Amino acid sequence: GSPVAVNLAKKGVSVEVWNRTKEKCLSAINAGAKEVLELENIDSAIVLTALPDLSQVESLLENGLTKALQPGDFLVVMGTVSPVAIKVLGEKLSERGVHLVDAPVSGGDVGAQNGTLSIMVGGTEEEFITLLDTFNKVGSTIKHLGPLGAGEMAKACNQIVVAVTLSALAEAVTLGRKAGLNSETLVEILSGGLANSQVLQVKKEKILSSDFTPGGSAVFQLKDLRFALEAGVDSGTSLPTTKIVTELFQSLVESGDGQLDHSAIIREIERRSN
């Protein structure tokens, strides 16, 4: 959320910021944003939230944000939440004339800082058009996927690919190491062929160095995979690979590595390989 606010402020948007942890507002304030001390005092027609789950969004609404939102205002959920549950919240807010739009993002901390996020939008065409100028200031690939919940569904699909790719990379690097291959050379070869991916390019340094300072944490990756499985059940879609990878991430989290970067899934593969 902080890099999004910084980019908006730097690009001339009038930005108000609030965070549960005040220190996290400082970079946005230094970029020109105004801090709001109480949620009910927010005076913005477009409110963006970048929170782990819908329960945190609902907590904000209960603790003052509902009072701040006026008929015609937009609440944009940029975190990854349940595609099913967000529709329920949308119905509640629509009774007050508030537009709820889901706009989860992909690109990690690097994409957020560089303003190159991929933004997957769920809402009406009119809502999308209204918000497009804002999205263009923080992202480079912005797509309208369909009605409310469609953005979260696309993000669930995205997270399947990310988690499965990270797990495959973890297996490949671990296999190579145990077979005596140089990991850096192996990753270089993978990068030059069909096995290359954005996931590999962004995460290879973490995998090679075992520095798992989080960008996207393993515990959040597990949450997102569970949303994907929920969506699979809701739509009658079989997701056998996703189920196995979810079990791997669950084991990683249960082993105490949940706060590490999701590329730390290699630690789970290594534990199973000893």
Image (spheres, rainbow, N blue to C red):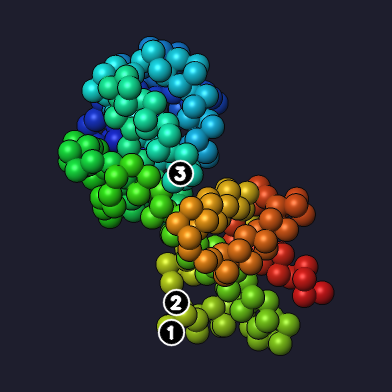
Residue under the image location 33 percent in, 22 percent down: 95
Q: Quick one: label 3, few (<14), some, or many (20+) residues within 10 Å? A: some
In the displayed structure, 98 sits above or below 68; it is below
Q: Quick one: label 1, few (<14), some, or many (20+) residues within 10 Å? A: few
- Extreme-right residue of the structure: 274
Q: Which residue is mark 1?
A: 193
Distance from the alpha carbon under mark 1 to that under mark 2: 6 Å
Q: Amino acid at mark 2?
A: Asn
| Image position, residue 51 (x, y; %) | 49, 36
When asked about the image quadrant of residue 271, the answer is bottom right
| Image position, residue 146 (x, y; %) | 28, 49
Q: Relative to 169, is 236 on the left or the right?
A: left
User: Which part of the image, by quadrant, shows the C terminus?
Assistant: bottom right
Residue under the image location 67 percent in, 61 percent down: 247
Q: Inspect this view and state whether residue 33 appears.
A: no
| Image position, residue 270 (x, y; %) | 74, 70
Q: Which residue is mark 2?
A: 196
Q: Relative to 252, is 218 on the left or the right?
A: left
Q: Nearer the viewer, residue 2 or 158?
A: 158
Distance from the alpha carbon under mark 3 to that under mark 1: 38 Å
**How many tags in the picture?**
3
Q: Which residue is mark 3?
A: 84
Give yes or no for contact between labels 1 and 2 (Cβ–Cβ under 8 Å).
Answer: yes
Helix, strand or loop at disc 2?
Answer: loop
When asked about the image quadrant of residue 173, the answer is bottom right
User: Along the polypeptide, which appears first: circle 3 or circle 1?
Assistant: 3
Q: Amino acid at mark 3?
A: Val
Give yes or no for contact between labels 3 and 1 (Cβ–Cβ under 8 Å).
Answer: no
Q: Relative to 187, is 274 on the left or the right?
A: right
Helix, strand or loop at disc 1?
Answer: loop
Helix, strand or loop at disc 3?
Answer: loop
